[in-house]
Amino acid sequence: MHVSEPDPSSDERPRRDFIVSVRGDGTDRRVLARGGYRKPLGVAIDGGRSAWWQERCTGDSELVVQDQGETGTLSISPCRVEVLTRRARVRDGRIAVRLRCREGCNGNAFGGRIVQGSKAFSFGRGSHVLRVPVKLGRQRSLLLRFDLSVRNGPPRRASIRVRR
């Protein structure tokens, strides 16, 4: 069974997902896996093993199998993208922002000076460069608040010092 509950610590109310085992009469409720951001696509339980399908950060799905006797409650891991760039120069109206993720990632980048509101991204595991259009106007430099909306993960925020 899959159960979703709102996260009480957030105003945006992202959903925390749990995979729960319950007998037919409603007794013996056990949480097999807990986490957030990735909704299980299907669940199967056989004796002491449980399995579920979940979205990968890059869009496909993956199968997770757990032996209950060995691990207890498993965590459904969220995407953990990192913004590596702290300083950037504007070249041809764009800055290069380095992002890193262990599994791969996709989402959107936002910021107050980003042209056209947002920049979509999708990449495989490792470090990748995202070329983001930025408009400085008459300023020579500024501190850009760079926000990432990540599919299957928490939002990320970084400050990047941008100059001509």
Image (cartoon, helix red, strand yellow):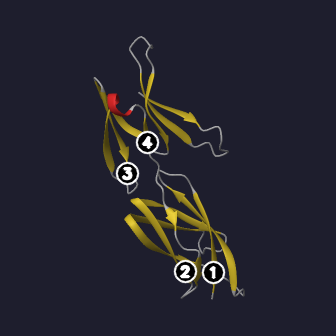
Q: Please determine whether, in this image, residue 113 is positioned above or below residue 41.
A: below
Q: CB atoms at circles 4 and 1 under 8 Å apart?
A: no
The residue that label 1 is drawn on is: 162
Mark number, residue 56: 3
Along the polypeptide, which appears first: circle 4 or circle 1? 4
Report the side of 69 relative to 22 (left or right). Answer: left
Percent across and percent down for residue 155 are 57, 55
The secondary structure type at the circle numbered 3 is loop
The residue that label 4 is drawn on is: 76
The residue that label 2 is drawn on is: 95
Q: Amino acid at mark 1?
A: Val
Which residue: 63% across, 89% down? 164
Q: CB atoms at circles 3 and 2 under 8 Å apart?
A: no
Question: Marks 1 and 2, how far apart in space?
Answer: 8 Å
Along the polypeptide, which appears first: circle 2 or circle 4? 4
Percent across and percent down for residue 150 are 51, 57
